[in-house]
Image (cartoon, rainbow, N blue to C red):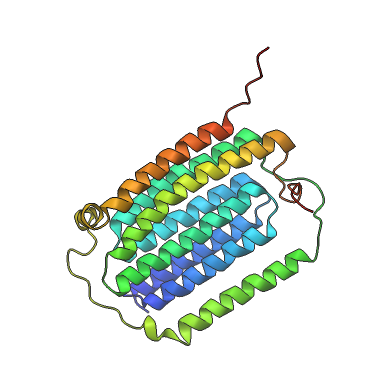
Amino acid sequence: MVPVSYYFALSAILFALGALGVLVRRNAIVVFMSVELMLNAANLLFVAFARSYAALNGQIYVFFVIAVAAAEVAIGLALIVAIFRTKQSIDIDEISSLKG
Amino acid sequence: MTIDLLLFFGLAAVAVGAAIAMLLSRNAVYSALFLILNFATVAVFFLLLGAPFIAMAQVTVYAGAIMVLFLFVIMLLGAEQVLGRHKGGWQRPLAILLALALMVETGYLIFWRSDLVSVIQAAASDYATPQAIGESLFRDYLLPFEVTSVLLLVAMVGVIVLTKEERKKAG
């Protein structure tokens, strides 16, 4: 059995990579995919903790996170499509109309 | 080194490599495909951690439905690449620095203050079978489960409203 702390380390690395993607990429869809990577890293942590304590609750939470992520992706992609219709671009540097 | 550790490190290398390749790909379609690879390896991790139901949900919902939606939108918009000059050159090194700081902080919490994670309890033989998950879901978590269905309905209606073409005013 692999020590559960290895899974925590892997989850931390994946979460940091997702955060890096949100910060450096300019394509809005890739930024969005990086958010999914972070959600996935958190899911891995939930399941590892559930295994560590031999409890089911962590896995139930992951189930709900997956369901909410599906809703979030649908809404987010619809917003990106709507933004693309008005600005003809999904470069997040261009989307600065709210800047003061 | 046992088989388990070899399997873990091999899969971890694939997962981290796929995540890095996703970040570095210029083409958004390649990014999406690398993310699917990452999700598949994480599903295998779920299997190793004794969560078969979550692993299958991960493959069907995440790697299947969600990523198909991503690929569909990328190809619909023709937004494989963002062209043009990158403004704000100081942001990128700062972002890399901040992400490294985040990784080091979480690593510190895990490896040097790991009193909370050192316990691993033996799981029962029927731990996390789909049957056990279903019983827990429909007994202890029935209300959140139903709220989730309402949330998905709201999301569906919202998407239809957001992507509907503006109707021209008649008259």
Nearer to me, B25 or A99? A99
Could you tell me residue A81's position as x and y percent?
62, 37
Query: Looking at the image, which residue sits at the far top?
Result: B171
* Residue B140 figure quarter: bottom left
Horizontal relation, residue A74 to residue B136: left or right: right
**Left or right for B5, reference B161:** left
The location of residue B171, given as percent across then percent down, is 68, 12
Q: How many marks?
A: 0
Q: Give the image quarter of residue A88.
A: top right
Image coordinates for residue B88, horizontal then vertical, percent: 81, 60
Relative height, residue B45 to residue B57 (above, below):
below
Question: Relative to A52, does residue A97 appear above or below in the rendering?
Answer: above
Q: Does residue B53 sit above or below B122 in this rendering?
A: above
The residue sitting at 61% across, 36% down in the picture is B75
The quadrant of the rendering that contains the N terminus of chain B is: bottom left
Residue B131 drawn at (x, y percent): 19, 54
